[in-house]
Image (spheres, coloured by chain):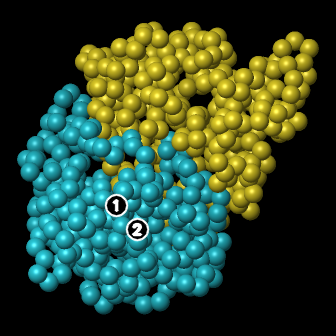
Chain colours: A yellow, B cyan
Amino acid sequence: MSEIRKDPIVNRWVIIATDRKNRPNDFSVYEENEDLAHCPFCEGNEIMTTPEITAIRRASSTPNSEGWDLRVIPNKFPALRVENELKQRKTGIYESLSATGAHELIIESPDHKKDLHQFSEEKISSILTTIKNRILDLKNDIRLLHIMIFKNVGPKAGATLKHPHFQLIAMPVIPKRAMEELGCSRDYFKTNKKCVFCDIIKQETESGRRIIDSGGEFVSFCPYASRFPFETWIIPKNHSADFSGIEDHEIKDLSRILKNTISKLHRAIPDFQYNLLIHTSPLQSDFSESFHWHIEIFPRIVKTAGFEWGTGFFINSTPPEEAAEFLREIQN
Amino acid sequence: MSEIRKDPIVNRWVIIATDRKNRPNDFSVYEENEDLAHCPFCEGNEIMTTPEITAIRRASSTPNSEGWDLRVIPNKFPALRVENELKQRKTGIYESLSATGAHELIIESPDHKKDLHQFSEEKISSILTTIKNRILDLKNDIRLLHIMIFKNVGPKAGATLKHPHFQLIAMPVIPKRAMEELGCSRDYFKTNKKCVFCDIIKQETESGRRIIDSGGEFVSFCPYASRFPFETWIIPKNHSADFSGIEDHEIKDLSRILKNTISKLHRAIPDFQYNLLIHTSPLQSDFSESFHWHIEIFPRIVKTAGFEWGTGFFINSTPPEEAAEFLREIQN
């Protein structure tokens, strides 16, 4: 039986996912030359996945068959399940919750090999709109307090399947790193009566040194205290805490800057592999004044060693000013 | 010019180490079959390293030449330097410090290939005593607030050199993850008038389910909310916040349990690669009542993906009870 356990020292939540023990991709090697006949996310292999939650389908096609442009499915080996009743358990100093939540996969396209920047802006917009709609739907389940949307590209980034997909995990707790960002930015707001992210955007735009692209409603930049070489953030210029509040014209702008930024990173970094994370506000609590949603992209160029894990104190040998200058000058 | 930068949102410190840019091992591939003639840590190659700080030498040998059993040297490509004057700088909302600190390497033995468990208990004791003495020495520099001692074994753990060594980084700030442990355990102490680590030891010893080895003055166990499969901690049974306060008979016991635990992990996990971290109290502030020093060992079996990075919410498919049972039953 899977459960969510709390570390009694720092209150870090961990999913102890016994159900995933026999997951075929665990501990396995990522195969670059996958057999397309056996990729569960390729068109024609719909029977290999769990039934779809939603899909963008071409006229006259039926669910869970060929003829789709995008599919959303529950993870076959979910870390958390909506069917599980939310129960708390205490054993001495230890505390756990049942593994209640949602774990969904957004299969971006039938195309097995494309990364995000290789899609048209319209296609990227349809992916982002689907993510927005999934958040709005899951928000209705009041047991779910937080949602994480992310994408792992390449084996170095922890991907086990090559076929392009986003993942979404909705959980019954606000995880530690999310709470840290939410809490610290609320403290900043209380002290300064301003959003810290808005202040960063202001200072970055004025200096320009770490900016990669600032056309339209969004800015992409390498943050001042980048943990990784070529770490890149994309953030809306106008204050907004909740990704699911994004409007159509903003989705259009975001698609353009995402495509441009990821293209540049691919050109700058040979065999570019990365994690992309959407940090958005919690589902059931109000951080609308102090939080500001954003996307973080972590290129997986260097291995993270014991020092970083043990201290949260990162050593980055590429100053973000140099990374940003390099990326700015690349013409797509 | 390297500097230590503070993230303005969550106050995370990052070393932007421009000096390390031309570090030969950066981005490089770890070579399993290294040419021993070119390993800077092998005997006879002392000229390839920076001059030694201290060493355990055989009779009649001279510093920086052959005839040693253990050497401590400053890192040739240090993230932080003691020579740097400690200065603070503010630029708008951003804050940085000069890269003041120490970055040392403890070359454990002239033997290029041995991992810690392959040394005798006496040899392990001499390594631990050296680490203790380096902490006591660096504590005298009141600019240094915290120290991290760690060891990366294998390329998956971020090691760039195979030759067995510990690293030590002393820094002018208390890094975020360390402060989190220190702060949370102090809160627990204030509420419960007890050390949370002592309470964990008590509950773990009573239940026995997650214990690997509990002979002598130390316990090794898989923590309740393990982030990684086979995550293992070693902790002194008697309350003590500061590793550098360890006494000779305790070093002897620690050497035995370290050797036994790492041997078991090697037998349990094929191609076992890991990070080992010593969490000890800060150098210039008093956490003696509430903190409890300990060693954390992270086997690098699974890749850490975007979800874990983005949320601090780990998914672990091996329950610690099963890992501990498996390790307990291995006879060395």
Q: Which mark is residue B113?
A: 2
Q: Nearer the viewer, residue A207 or B289?
A: A207
- Does residue A315 appear to the left or right of A176 in the view shown? left
Count neighbours of disc 1 (C-alpha within 10 A) and say few if under 14, some if 14 to 19, many if 20 or more.
few
Eyeballing the image, is A149 above or below A90? above
Q: Which mark is residue B150?
A: none
Q: Nearer the viewer, mark 1 or mark 2?
A: 1
In the rendered image, residue B218, in percent from the top left (x then y), is placed at: 42, 83
Query: Is the residue under label 2 in contact with that under label 1 (CB below 8 Å)?
Result: no
Residue holding disc 1? B36
Which residue is found at the position 59% from the left and 85% from the top? Answer: B331
* Amino acid at dot 1: Leu
In the rendered image, residue A71, in percent from the top left (x then y), is placed at: 77, 27
In the rendered image, residue B91, in percent from the top left (x then y), is placed at: 18, 29
Label 1 to label 2: alpha-carbon separation: 10 Å
Eyeballing the image, is B295 above or below B158? below
Q: Nearer the viewer, residue A86 or B273?
A: B273
* Amino acid at dot 2: Lys
Q: Chain of mark 2?
A: B
